[in-house]
Image (cartoon, grey):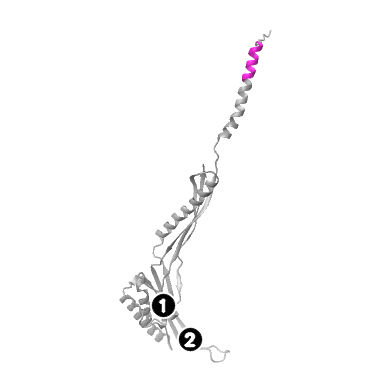
Amino acid sequence: MKVRYFLPVPLLRKAVLAAGLSAALVGAAPALAQDEAPASGTITMEGRGSVAVAPDMAVISTSVVTTGKGAADALSGNSAAIAKVIDAIKANGIEAKDIQTTGFGIYPRYDHSKSSDRQPDIVGYEIRNGVEIKIRDLTKLGDLLTLVVDSGANAVDGIRFEVSDPAEKLDEARKKAVDAARHKAEVFAAAAGAELGGIQTITETGVQMPRPVMMRAESMMMAKGSPVPVEAGEETIAANVTISWSLK
C-alpha cells in the first residue's frame, strides 16, 4: 500500500513561488552579465617616418682608354697610364682598399669601309681599364675629380653618392613611424569614445634606403687645374609600420 503525503496549501504555494523565482534569476543572469561586460575591439593604423640624411661618401668610376695597332702595344700603353692614375690617387691620401678595378677589356677595331661581302679587317685594338675610387671625405671630391683627369684618365663614367652607415638613421625613422601610427590611433579612438589599450601586433611593412645617385661627368673631361664643383644633396631614409591596439 502506497502512502501519499500532501503539503498544506500555504506551504505548497511558497514552494512554487520559490522555485519560479530561482528559475527567473538563473535565466536573467547571462543577460545581466552580458549587459555589464565592457565593450572590446581593436584598431589598426599605419605610420610612416622619414629622415633626411646627407651622403657622406662618394664613388668615382673612371677609366683609361687607349688604342694601338697591336694588342700588346695597346695594352702596354694602357697599363702605364692606369698605373699613373692609381699612383696619383694614392699620393692624395686614398687608401688601397678604396681603389678597385671594375672593368678591363680588349676590343678589336675593324675597318668597315670596304665591301660588306667580306669579313672586315682588324686595324687595331682598344684597351679599356676602369677603376672605382671610394672617397670618404667629400671635401676632397672636387680636387680628386680634377686629379684623375690630369693624371691620365680619359673617361669618367660618373659619381655615385652613398651613406656609409644608414642603420642609426633607419632606427630614427622607425621611431617616427611608430609615433605617427599611435597618433592616428589615438585620434580615432578618442573620436569613438574609447582609449587605446595594449599593442596586439606590430609589423614593419617596408623601408626606404638611400639609392646610389649616379652623376654623369662628361664635362669633367674639360677640367684642368681647378676643382670640379660637385653637390651631394640629401637622401631620404624611411620606414613604414602597421600596429594594432586593443580598445578599452
Q: Which residues are magenta?
A: 8-18
| Closest to the observer, 233 or 80 | 233
Residue 236 can be seen, yes or no: yes
- Name the mark on residue 220: none
Which class describes the residues within 10 Å of circle 2: few (<14), some (14-19), or many (20+)? Answer: some
Residue at 47%, 55% in the rendered image: 177
Lateral position of residue 32 relative to residue 90, left or right: right
For residue 178: magenta? no
- Residue 130: x and y in percent read 41, 77
Which residue is tagged 1?
A: 62
| Amino acid type, callout 1 | Thr
For residue 13: magenta? yes
- Vertical relation: 118 (above or below) 8: below
Residue 23 position by quadrant: top right
Residue ranking furthest to the right? 1
Residue 151 can be seen, yes or no: no
- Name the mark on residue 109: 2
| Closest to the observer, 51 or 57 | 51
| Closest to the observer, 90 or 129 | 90
| Amino acid type, callout 2 | Arg
- Residue 90: x and y in percent read 32, 75
Q: Earlier in the sequence, mark 1 or mark 2?
A: 1
- Vertical relation: 16 (above or below) 115: above
Q: Quadrant of the N terminus?
A: top right
- Vertical relation: 106 (above or below) 12: below
- Residue 57: x and y in percent read 38, 69
Magenta stretch, main secondary structure class: helix
Secondary element type, mark 2 = strand
Secondary element type, mark 1 = strand
Residue 63 position by quadrant: bottom left
C-alpha distance separating marks 1 and 2: 22 Å
